[in-house]
Amino acid sequence: MHKWAMFILFIAASILGLSVLIFAPPSSGEEVIPEAKDNEIQFILTNFKFDKDEYRVRAGEPVILTMINRQGTHGVMVQGTDINLLKDNPSQEVVFEEPGEYMLLCSVMCGTGHADMVAKLIVEEPLEDGDAAETNEQAA
């Protein structure tokens, strides 16, 4: 009698497990990337390329630089600074004091296209007080 009870419990658990697998909503298979904050620049990296050719920030304003690896293993180095985003340290808050241009390079040897994995970070002039008010009015 005990064997029959165990057998019935096993069959019931198997049916329940299969029904969960069969009726579960399908997965899109794509990684969900969190939406960037207002003061955040996301570098979304795939094999041998950044998601954009250039990124823009304002001088004097704090910005969070975040690296997201979608394919392969990469790092982001901002040439001429000590910024190097890696798997263990994918985000860093920084303030660029002066306008200018910085090359973004992959800092992890990622394969044959590694040398071509570059982008540009453009640090623009800070907004003047009047410009900020104008921008806020246009946004409303």
Image (cartoon, helix red, strand yellow):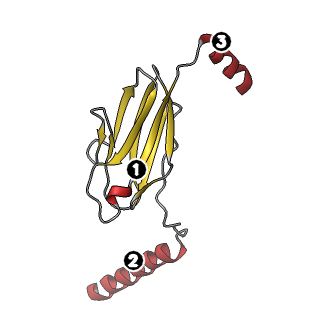
Residue 131 occupies which quadrant of the picture?
top right
Q: Residues within 10 Å of mark 3 (few under 14, many from 20)?
A: few
| Whole-percent x, y for residue 105 in the image | 35, 47
Q: Which mark is residue 130?
A: 3
Which residue is at the front of the view, 15 or 62?
Answer: 62
Quickly name the residue at label 2: 13
- Of the residues under marks 1 and 2, which one precedes in the sequence? 2
Observer-side mark, 3 or 2, equals 3
| Whole-percent x, y for residue 8 in the image | 37, 84
Which residue is at the front of the view, 54 or 74?
Answer: 54
Which residue is at the front of the view, 98 or 57?
Answer: 98
Q: Quadrant of the N terminus?
A: bottom left
Q: Amino acid at mark 2?
A: Ala
Between the C-alphas of marks 3 and 2, the distance is 67 Å
Q: Amino acid at mark 1?
A: Val
Between the C-alphas of marks 1 and 2, the distance is 53 Å
Along the horizontal axis of the image, is 2 left or right of 131? left
Residue at 30%, 82% (x, y): give it. Answer: 6
Residue at 60%, 11% (x, y): give it. Answer: 129
- Secondary element type, mark 2: helix
Residue at 29%, 64% (x, y): give it. Answer: 111
Q: Is 135 drawn above or below residue 20 in the view shown?
A: above
- Secondary element type, mark 3: helix
Along the horizontal axis of the image, is 79 left or right of 140? left
Q: Are marks 1 and 2 in contact (CB under 8 Å)?
A: no
Quickly name the residue at label 1: 118
Number of marks in the rendered image? 3
Q: Residues within 10 Å of mark 1 (few under 14, many from 20)?
A: some
Q: Which mark is residue 107?
A: none
- Of the residues under marks 3 and 1, which one precedes in the sequence? 1
Between the C-alphas of marks 3 and 1, the distance is 35 Å
Residue at 28%, 46% (x, y): give it. Answer: 86
